[in-house]
Image (cartoon, grey):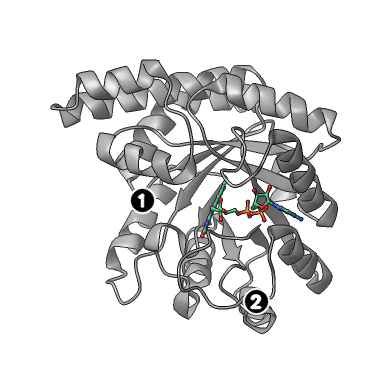
């Protein structure tokens, strides 16, 4: 099923992101994580490819996406990056996605890493055009409420985002952010630029100080004073940071849903406890906006 069907049925989607294990690592843990996450019945689960050191090799992303769909009947969104791939590699991956009946693809450039292979594509919109030409896939793309770290200015970034939508992206998923005002400003800007596809807000609960600081440094997101004060004040108590991170993310999500966001994409970091806590906290609100309250 294409994710567009979900947007037709629901006012606000709730989805999870997971990442595959590193190359040559044991895969038992990821399948256990999925078994735990599926009980929370997200609308779909996205599976990264090559992000944060996880593997893109052996089509592990596609295999995990297939498992999610086949074993649990939950739609899967397979991430596909072009930075380190030739056109032929990408066409083969698309053929494998088709064979495994994965209908939904998040088409990305990927982060440029040292020693990467020559690529036939410089930007995500070129990959989106390829997937569109091949046909048979619903295509999502990434967006950046605070701007992409490499972009010179917001106007250029939004112009390039429009190229992705014009090339065939039907849905955007945002980079993580911690200040909703950044997201609202971004939404006003992209709507004014004529980008009218659904946008899911990417939320990562700040439940681990070291991890969140590492991720923020990598992706360029801003830590608001309120949150960094909290992380610094309680750094010696991981349990307190965990509770505070869940509370902060819950408040963020509740505000976004009240403001009419079309989806929340939870960066689970493969931690089902985080996903469970957030699901418990926002479950009734989601049912209410989606008209599912009994
Ligand atoms: P693009 O849309 O190509 O943009 C990259 C930069 O190029 C931007 O600054 C943009 O403004 C600029 N640009 C675009 N088009 C042009 C043009 N025509 N001329 C000049 N400049 C241009 N990474 C992974 O490796 N694996 C993953 O699974 C993964 N999943 C992600 C999921 C989400 C929801 C998000 C938000 C990010 C994810 N990333 C992942 C990270 C992503 O790959 C990086 O942020 C990457 O640097 C940019 O990818 P993109 O698809 O947004 O690139």
Q: Percent from the top left, x then y, of residue 267?
A: 45, 43
- Depicted 245 relative to depicted 52: above or below: above
- 268 and 31: which is toward the camera: 268
Which residue is identified by label 1?
270
Q: Which is more foreground, mark 2 or mark 1?
A: 2
- 132 and 120: which is toward the camera: 120
- Depicted 240 relative to depicted 210: above or below: above
Q: Of helix, strand and loop, which one carries label 2?
A: helix
Q: CA distance from mark 2 to mark 1?
A: 26 Å
The answer to which quarter of the image holds residue 189 is top right
**Counting residues from the N terminus, which is met first, the one under dot 2 or under dot 1?**
2
**Quadrant assignment for the C terminus:** top right
Q: Which mark is residue 128?
A: none
**Quadrant assignment for the N terminus:** bottom right
* Left/right of residue 280 with respect to residue 199 in the rendered view: left
Q: Percent from the top left, x then y, of residue 172?
A: 68, 44
Q: Which mark is residue 90?
A: 2
* Left/right of residue 141 with respect to residue 180 in the rendered view: right
- Depicted 17 relative to depicted 76: above or below: above
Please indicate, yes or no, whether residue 8 appears anywhere in the rendered image: no
**What residue is drawn where x is 69% and y is 31%?**
11
Q: Tag count in the figure? A: 2
**What residue is drawn where x is 30% and y is 17%?**
229
For the residue carrying disc 1, how many other residues have a C-alpha within 10 Å: few (<14), some (14-19), or many (20+)?
many
The answer to which quarter of the image holds residue 185 is top right
Can you tell me whether the CB of the residue at mark 1 lies under 8 Å from the nearest atom of ligand 1?
no
* Left/right of residue 77 with respect to residue 103 in the rendered view: left
**What residue is drawn where x is 56% and y is 60%?**
110
Q: Percent from the top left, x then y, of residue 165?
A: 79, 49
For the residue carrying disc 2, how many other residues have a C-alpha within 10 Å: few (<14), some (14-19), or many (20+)?
some
Please indicate, yes or no, whether residue 24 appears anywhere in the rendered image: yes
């Amino acid at each position: 099923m294409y994710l567009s069907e979900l947007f037709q049925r629901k006012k606000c989607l709730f989805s999870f992101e997971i990442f595959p294990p590193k190359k040559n690592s044991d895969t038992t843990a990821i399948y256990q994580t999925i078994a735990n996450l599926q009980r929370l019945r997200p609308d779909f689960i996205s599976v990264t490819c090559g992000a944060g050191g996880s593997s893109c090799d052996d089509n592990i992303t596609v295999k995990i996406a297939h498992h999610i769909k086949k074993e649990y009947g939950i739609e899967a969104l397979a991430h596909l990056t072009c930075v380190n791939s030739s056109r032929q590699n990408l066409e083969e991956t698309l053929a494998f996605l088709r064979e495994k009946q994965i209908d939904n693809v998040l088409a990305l450039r990927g982060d440029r890493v040292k020693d990467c292979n020559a690529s036939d594509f410089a930007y995500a919109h070129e990959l989106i055009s390829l997937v569109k030409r091949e046909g048979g896939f619903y295509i999502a793309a990434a967006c950046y409420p605070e701007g992409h770290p490499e972009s010179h200015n917001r106007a250029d970034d939004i112009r390039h985002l429009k190229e992705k939508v014009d090339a065939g992206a039907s849905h955007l998923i945002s980079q993580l952010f911690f200040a909703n005002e950044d997201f609202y400003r971004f939404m006003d800007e992209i709507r004014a630029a004529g980008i009218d596809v659904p946008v899911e807000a990417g939320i990562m609960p700040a439940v681990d100080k070291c991890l969140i600081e590492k991720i923020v440094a990598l992706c360029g997101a801003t830590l608001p004073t309120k949150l960094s004060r909290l992380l610094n004040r309680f750094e010696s108590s991981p349990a307190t940071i965990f509770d505070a991170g869940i509370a902060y993310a819950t408040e963020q999500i509740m505000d976004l849903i009240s403001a009419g966001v079309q989806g929340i994409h939870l960066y689970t970091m493969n931690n089902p406890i985080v996903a469970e806590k957030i699901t418990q906290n926002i479950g009734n609100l989601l049912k209410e906006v989606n008209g599912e309250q009994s």
